[in-house]
Structures are given as C-alpha cells and as structure tokens.
Image: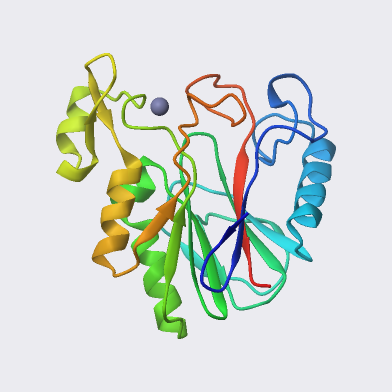
Amino acid sequence: MELLRGSRVVVTGRTGGFSTGPYDSRNLGANVGDVPLAVARNRALTVTEAGADGAVFMRQVHGVNVEYVSGPHDGVPDTDAVFTDRPGLALAALGADCPAVVVSGPGWTGAAHAGRAGTLNGVVPALVNALRKAGATELTAFIGPGICGRCYEVPEAMHADAPEVMRATTRWGTPGLDLRAALTAQLVDLGVPPTHDDRCTLETPELYSYRRAPRTGRHAVLTHLP
Ligand SMILES: [Zn+2]
C-alpha cells in the first residue's frame, strides 16, 4: 500500500480472487467477458481488503470526463476520472496496460484511467483542475503500473504525432510510446510531482496485460481517504 498526502493507495494484482480461465483470478473489470458474479465477488473482497467501506468503479471510455462522486457506484458511465471528499469511499481506476493515476491532497482524492488517448487528451490535468476547483491543495500523485515504452509498440504515424516526451523506442528498435514519461511531465508541469509503480504490465505476469493476451481481466489502482 502506498501512502499519499491524504490518501491510501492500493494496487491490485491477479491472485486471490474468484475468476477462472483467462481472467484468473482477481479480475475487477466488468465488461471484459468474465462471469459477473465473479467480478462482483472480486470487487467486494478487494474493497474490504483495502480497508474501505464502499467503492466507485467507472465505465471507462478513454475520455477526459471527470465526475465528483459521494457514494458507491458499480460503473459511472462514460467517465475516466472521479474524485471525492468522502472518507472510506474507494475510487478504482481499472487497467490492463493503461496506467491509472491517483491525485490526492488533505481531504480529497481522485483516480484517473490514463491510456494513450486519455493521456494525449489530458484526463490527468482535467482531474487536477477539478480537484483544485473544488478546493483541494497540496496535491501529490501516484502513477500505477502500465506498459513501458520499450514494450509499447505503435505505428510510425502514431509515434510521429505524439508529443516528444511520449516518444520511445521498443527494445526491438521500432516506434514506441512511453505513457509514464508523458504523465510525469504533465503532473510536473502542474506542480504535482508523482511517484510511480515501475512495473511494466506486459513484463509482469502478476498483472493483467492486454498486449500479452487480448482476452484478459483488469487490475486496479484504488484510493481512499482514511
Ligand atoms: Zn515493458
């Protein structure tokens, strides 16, 4: 468990849950083909183990919509970032290569799902701005595990269109993208220097990776105020 200024952060893995087959076993994603009852049990277990009273999950669409939340929800529609001031309410951002980002300050915490599109379109700056507008100060951030720049191969045109800080080269010498570098730069620009989980999802069997296996589950980064 990570501790940010104000919030507790938990990064989940694959073990200890109820899902089987390609979702084995702590899949937290509701729309990936897994048995709904298994996902519900995995979510309930994870929230309890994290020490929270309830949780908010999102129906993530690689967008930049940010929502304030005040109670449990099993899938906030069309949303990739949520924030709250309610103690004990865990906010979950799901991923299977896309990094999740937590931004917290005293009395406030937020979570965002930041894949390529979300990073390019600024979902994390949108979350920081929403938190500040609500009155949050002294913000710090945490970037969860994600696919690394040496594994995340993309077409040459996509690489050329990306901001320079996001461009990388894969370990086999082709165009790649480094989402963590881009997210770090965004957060530093906003005065919210992040810490991060340095694991690459593709290289870490304990985490889900869409690039490793398209039919797979989702881990999560959860944050809650104590
Ligand atoms: Zn990697």
**In the image, 103: left or right of 88?**
left
**Residue in the picture at 59% in, 68% down:** 7
Q: Quadrant of ligand 1?
A: top left
Please tell me whether residue 17 is drawn above or below residue 120 in the rendered image.
above
Here the colouring is: rainbow
**Residue in the picture at 38% in, 58% down:** 194
Task: Give coordinates of residue 56: x percent, y percent.
Answer: 67, 60
Task: Give coordinates of residue 222: x percent, y percent.
Answer: 62, 55
Query: Between residues 73 and 107, which one lies in front from this camera angle?
Result: 107
Q: Quadrant for the N terminus, please.
A: bottom right
Residue 138: quadrant of the picture: bottom left
**In the image, 196: left or right of 73?**
left
**Residue in the picture at 62% in, 37% down:** 218
Query: Between residues 78 and 136, which one lies in front from this camera angle?
Result: 136
Task: Give coordinates of residue 33: x percent, y percent.
Answer: 69, 29
Please tell me whether residue 204 is drawn above or below residue 12 in the rendered image.
above
* Residue at the limit of the structure toward the top, as seen here: 172
**In the image, 40: left or right of 116?**
right
* Residue at the limit of the structure toward the bottom, as seen here: 135
Q: Quadrant for the C terminus, please.
A: bottom right
Please tell me whether residue 207 is drawn above or below residue 130 in the rendered image.
above
Task: Give coordinates of residue 115: x percent, y percent.
Answer: 41, 43
